[in-house]
Image: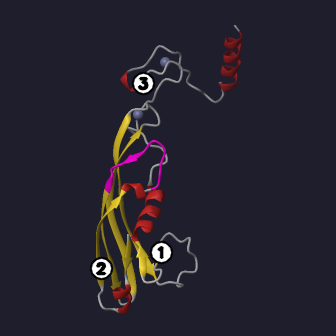
Amino acid sequence: MKLDVRKLLTGECVRIPIDYTLESSALPVFDDVVFEPEVHVNGELTNNGGYMRLALLCSIAYDAICARCLKEVNDTININFEKTVCEEGDLQNTDNDDYVEINDGMLDIDEALIEDMILNFPLKIVCDENCMGLCPKCGKDLNSGSCSCVTKEIDPRLAPLLKFFDNDDGEN
Ligand SMILES: [Zn+2]
Ligand SMILES: [Zn+2]
């Protein structure tokens, strides 16, 4: 959503409440992640003697696949930030994440939200920090118990030796 902030710039008001629904089709695409269809966004834009701030708050629920065991994961990303709002042309370095810029009297709220979301979205989604994942050999879910495959504790000093045995196995 683009918010008309001209009244805030002229001093006609000092606060603009933000309360809208964002279609999740506007959100960025992440592999194997499905967002809930609609996201409720809350926040406010304030002007405190020329110092403008944007505060945004929303929770986005999603379904994904655990990167280790491939189980379905249902989780939520919480977005909660405050950024300084700059008037057009005030911003020298537009890559600065702490600022958002007004264009033609409008502030693009969706853009600010999506930028923050991309920065904070987990690179790897797991069902649990301690998820054991699947055995690389037999594919058994190791969360439900170990399998009978030989697992090797890799001691870095022994690694070359293990490699030697592995090669030997392969040839026979
Ligand atoms: Zn898992
Ligand atoms: Zn196994």
Q: Residues within 10 Å of mark 2 (few under 14, many from 20)?
A: some
Q: Which residues are magenta?
A: 28-38
- 154 and 22: which is toward the camera: 22
Q: Assess mark 3: CB under 8 A from ligand 2?
A: yes
Residue 31: within the magenta? yes
Separation of residues labelled 2 and 3 (CA atoms): 52 Å
Q: Is residue 75 left or right of residue 30?
A: left
**Magenta part, dominant SS:** loop
What scheme was used to colour the molecule? secondary structure
Q: Residues within 10 Å of mark 1 (few under 14, many from 20)?
A: some
Q: Is residue 19 left or right of residue 154?
A: left
- Can you say which quadrant of the picture contains the N terminus? bottom left
Q: Position of residue 71 (x, y in %)?
A: 39, 32
**Quarter location, residue 51:** bottom left
Residue that numbered label 3 is attached to: 142
Q: Is residue 9 above or below residue 38?
A: below
Callout 1–callout 2 Cβ contact below 8 Å: no
Residue that numbered label 1 is attached to: 99
Marking on residue 16: 2
Q: Residue at x 32, y 61 (%)?
A: 58
Residue 45: within the magenta? no
Residue most extreme to the top: 172
